[in-house]
Amino acid sequence: MATSIDPAERLLNLLIALVNTHGRMTKEQVRASVAGYADAPSDEAFERMFERDKDTLRDLGIPLVTVTDAGHGDDIGYRIDLDAYALPAIDLTAAELGVLTLAAQTWQDRTMRGDTARALTKLRAVGQGPGATDLVAGLAPRVRSGGAVFAPLLDAAQARQVVRLTYRAASTGEVRERRVEPWQLIARRGGWVLLGWDRDRGATRSFRLSRIEGSIRAVGEPGAFDAPSPEQVEQAMAAWREGPARVATLAVLPERAEATRVRAIETPPDAPDWSQDPVVGPLVVGRDVVHVAFRNAWELAEELVGYGDAVLVLDPPDVRERALQLLERAAALAPAPRVDDDVAVLEVERG
């Protein structure tokens, strides 16, 4: 016995047939030539199937029109209004295509990389000139993949389901289990952050996905909590803006770390001349010294270590040390005497 065709596939077959028909298709032609309708066991079943599919196409915004024969008013056919269905010509300026390119390059997760690449290829085919890509050359912030925990957290946030996770605190390195009501996942300085309600602490919290260890475990049933209010989300985000406004001094290789460079501020009037420092001077040769405003030392450190040796942290000391801790943890090294020249820069204490 022939395998029946899935309703979604049948609907797609109908759409393709109606788009490509010359003039119109009658119900009899649909039943005889469109794959899936031959599965109907009776005329009544076909009628119900066909009517349901027509309604679905119209619900999807597809302009299905009814066409009657000029000589026989009861001879009804159907077609897709191609003038209404076709997209108008896309006229993107170089600047508009540049912004879309930059947005697409932000998404580096494997599940999205292929789709964004194909979309950009199509858009460039109708964009205006090569200048579109020149606008974003070197300016391509990356949002690193959230790893294996991203999808389970996204599913839990959508289902309003509590999760249990193991988290390593940034400030103390303490590892403990948390029960969290996941609210939102946001991209922040090159990584993903979970905003939610920590049930064990009875307070809003934010969690870097890169600090979550092990797997995510769902607890209880979906719909266990209400969606957060804007005030609660703002409170969870406040942790990323805590602390006094400060300035970090970085030595950056040319044409590297552009997403950090664009936030650079003017050199503070009291900034030292690092090129004259007997220890640091030789190591900043060939690099640009830039100054970046920040509030959260851990957040800035996590952003900068993603650039590897392209960025050296000259000041302040707490950002240097946090960057070193992250690098040592990533390399699975115990703290040891630091002898390499690049790291020696990070050991310089300024008064």
Image (cartoon, helix red, strand yellow):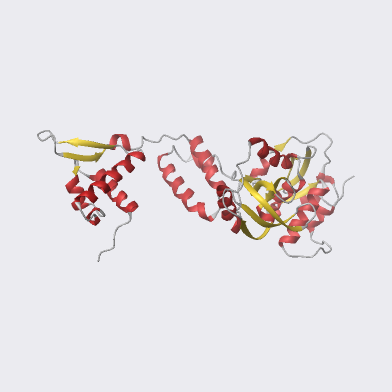
Name the residue: 10% across, 35% down: 72
For image coordinates 26% across by 54% down, the residue present is: 36
Q: Can residue 190 be seen from the camera position used here?
A: no
Q: Which residue is drawn at 28% across and 51% down?
A: 13
The percent coordinates of residue 323 (x first, y second) are 76, 53
Relative to the observer, which residue lies in front, 209 or 130? 209
In the picture, which quadrant includes the N terminus?
A: bottom left
Q: Residue 76, can we see it?
A: yes
Left or right for 320, reference 69:
right
Q: In which quarter of the image is the C terminus?
A: top right
Numbered marks: total: 0
Q: Where, by quadrant of the figure, is residue 177 drawn? A: bottom right
**Quick one: 350 or 220, which is closer to the camera?**
220
| Residue 64 x %, y % | 28, 38
Taking the view exactly as shown, the residue that stands out farthest to the right is 351
Q: Measured from the top left, where is residue 190 in percent x and y?
A: 64, 48
